[in-house]
Image (cartoon, helix red, strand yellow):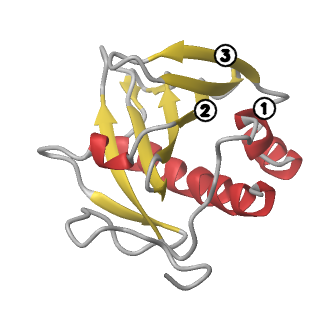
């Protein structure tokens, strides 16, 4: 394999990556720059860890903007993004990387996530959740998904700069 080329397998659901990103040693809270945090109206993130159903540990960081009712999170997980591919989910492009779009409306608060294929055995999940209502209606899911694409693009660019 040539240096800098990605090793997606031929049966991958994703396009060939522009470059693998080793996010294994990156602090997820470092993935939003101060400029991005200012634009989103959030302060420093709060880190956490959790164990997924399959026993894999996830490292997380979350940010909240209580004025707009919007929460943001970045999760780094040591499994392939292929695990997120499923029925009714689309493959999107985030700065040249394939990403699975996950849309959920728990109760009536819409959320949209992008699970980004950054390496054969690592993924980043970027999520935006909106609890903001206008005239008694939740924020349109297309707006929430548009925002997560913007945030995920910034996160991928930052991860490329921070990766070893």
Where is residue 113? Give x, y as percent. Answer: 43, 40
> In the shown orientation, is residue 67 left or right of residue 139?
right
Mark 3 against mark 2, which lies toward the viewer? 3
Residue for point 72% across, 20% down: 47
| Callout 2 touching callout 1 (CB < 8 Å) | yes
> In the shown orientation, is residue 118 left or right of residue 158?
left
Q: Mark 1 to mark 3: distance in Å?
A: 17 Å
Residue for point 88% across, 46% down: 34
In the displayed image of the protein, which residue is found farthest to the left?
Answer: 87
Q: Mark 2 to mark 1: distance in Å?
A: 9 Å
Mark 1 against mark 3, which lies toward the viewer? 3
Of residue 99 and residue 83, the one placed in the foreground of this image is: 83
Mark linked to residue 62: none
On the image, numbered disc 3 is attached to which residue? 48
> In the shown orientation, is residue 69 left or right of residue 101?
right
On the image, numbered disc 1 is attached to which residue? 42
Dot 3: what SS? strand
Dot 2: what SS? strand
Residue for point 50% across, 55% down: 149
On the image, numbered disc 2 is attached to which residue? 72
| Callout 3 touching callout 2 (CB < 8 Å) | no
Disc 1 crowd, CA 10 A, few/some/many (<14, 14-19, 20+): many
> In the shown orientation, is residue 95 left or right of residue 39?
left
Where is residue 79? Give x, y as percent. Answer: 42, 39
Dot 1: what SS? loop
């Amino acid at each position: 394999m040539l240096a800098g080329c990605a090793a997606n397998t031929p049966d991958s659901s994703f396009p060939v990556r522009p470059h693998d990103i080793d996010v294994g040693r990156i602090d997820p809270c470092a993935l939003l720059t101060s400029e991005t945090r200012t634009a989103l109206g959030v302060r420093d993130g709060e880190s956490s860890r959790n164990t997924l159903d399959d026993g894999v540990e996830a490292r997380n960081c979350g940010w909240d903007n209580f004025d707009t009712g919007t929460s943001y999170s970045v999760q780094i997980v040591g499994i392939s993004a292929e695990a997120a591919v499923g029925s009714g989910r689309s493959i999107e492009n985030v700065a040249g990387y394939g990403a699975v779009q996950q849309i959920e409306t728990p109760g009536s608060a819409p959320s949209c996530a992008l699970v980004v294929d950054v390496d054969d055995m690592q993924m980043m999940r970027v999520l935006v959740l909106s609890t903001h209502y206008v005239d008694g209606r939740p924020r349109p899911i297309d707006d929430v998904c548009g925002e997560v694409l913007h945030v995920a693009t910034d996160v991928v660019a930052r991860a490329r700069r921070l990766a070893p």
